[in-house]
Amino acid sequence: MNSPLTSVALFHLGPIPITQPVLVTWAIMAVLVLGAIAVSRRLTREPSATQEVFELIVDTVDSQIRDTMQAEPGPYRAFIGTLFVFIFAANWSTLIPGVEPPTAHLETDAALALLVFLAVIWFGVRAGGVRGYLRTFATPSPIMIPLNFVESITRTFSLLVRLFGNVMSGVFMIGIVLSLAGLLVPIPLMALDLLTGAVQAYIFAILAMVFIAGAVGGETAAAPGTSQKGKTP
Amino acid sequence: MNWLAFCSIASAAVAVSFGAIGPALGEGRAVAAAMDAIARQPEAAGTISRTLFVGLAMIETMAIYCLVIALLLLFANPLLK
């Protein structure tokens, strides 16, 4: 059985080896970009059915951002929405026979987690300046500075391992079951895998929102769970 | 098969099995608490379930770490090279 930690190069583009996850990622990117262009090219005030559906998706993303970050979704919609839609599409690309989801490989997840890490810094600096961003490391007290600093790295790492582990374990398990019992047996597992994929895309986006909200700071941007404290009778 | 390979395989199994116990208990408690909270306050179900999902993902990461350790032992073991 192939190791899930390595990926085989399909062909070489000059000196750069191109693997299957990279090809699938490019295909997903192309489909998403072309689809987005095609849908948003002819927007009308009297929406057609297609436009209605996509407005619903954007509205859902907006309301999730508003609920989680307690902020207006404007600046974050593009990043969070793209993150969610891409991971969702990548996890569900396993529906196409012969395609392995690119998120089942460490490199794709590492790239996504790195994007979140950089976005946290970018949004943090944009909201409060460099000093304001650095001050978020000293909350609630300066004793926490080393801990907060380490946390900002470890949480990126855990973001990467979480997505990789969940998607890869699904693919791996289906592979094992398929080698033991053939036709139709892995179908319930594949259905479970689709559910896991959707939940993981959601969780990745939510965690990115929570991290960005923490860096943007302010009393309003609390992590979910803290906002309901003290209200229970 | 030398004893190093034997130890690697055995510890991979131990890592997954014991690594699954803790998160399973933790997730059970988290879901039970969330059910309790939703039963008491059905209007807060949206917030509670979103928080529950994030919390479950956090807890689940522990089990996933153990799985990754097991896979490292089986497929990328530096001692067996």
Image: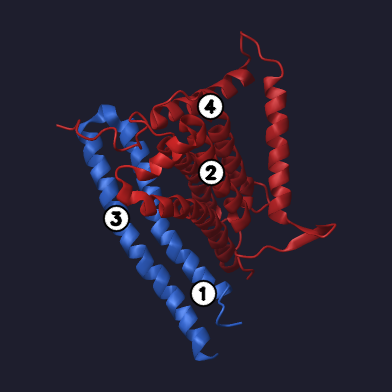
- Asked where in the image residue A46 lies, by quadrant, the reply is top right
Q: Camera-side residue: A43 or A227?
A: A227
What is the x, y in percent for residue A209?
46, 37
Q: Is residue B50 left or right of residue A184?
A: left
Q: Secondary structure at mark 1?
A: helix
Residue at 49%, 37% in the rendered image: A130
Which tint was used for chain B? blue
Residue at 54%, 53% in the rendered image: A167
What is the x, y in percent for residue A197?
52, 46
What is the x, y in percent for residue A54?
59, 24
- Asked where in the image residue A68 lies, by quadrant, the reply is top left
Q: Residues within 10 Å of mark 2 (few under 14, many from 20)?
A: many
Q: CA distance from mark 4 to mark 3?
A: 36 Å
User: Which label number is shown at residue B26?
Assistant: 3
Query: Residue under mark 4: which chain is it in?
Result: A
- The lab-note entry on whether marks 4 and 3 share a chain reads no
Residue A33, placed above or below residue B6: above
Quarter containing the C terminus of chain A: top left
Q: CA distance from mark 2 to mark 3?
A: 27 Å
* Mark nearer the N terminus (2 vs 4): 4
Q: CA distance from mark 2 to mark 1?
A: 29 Å
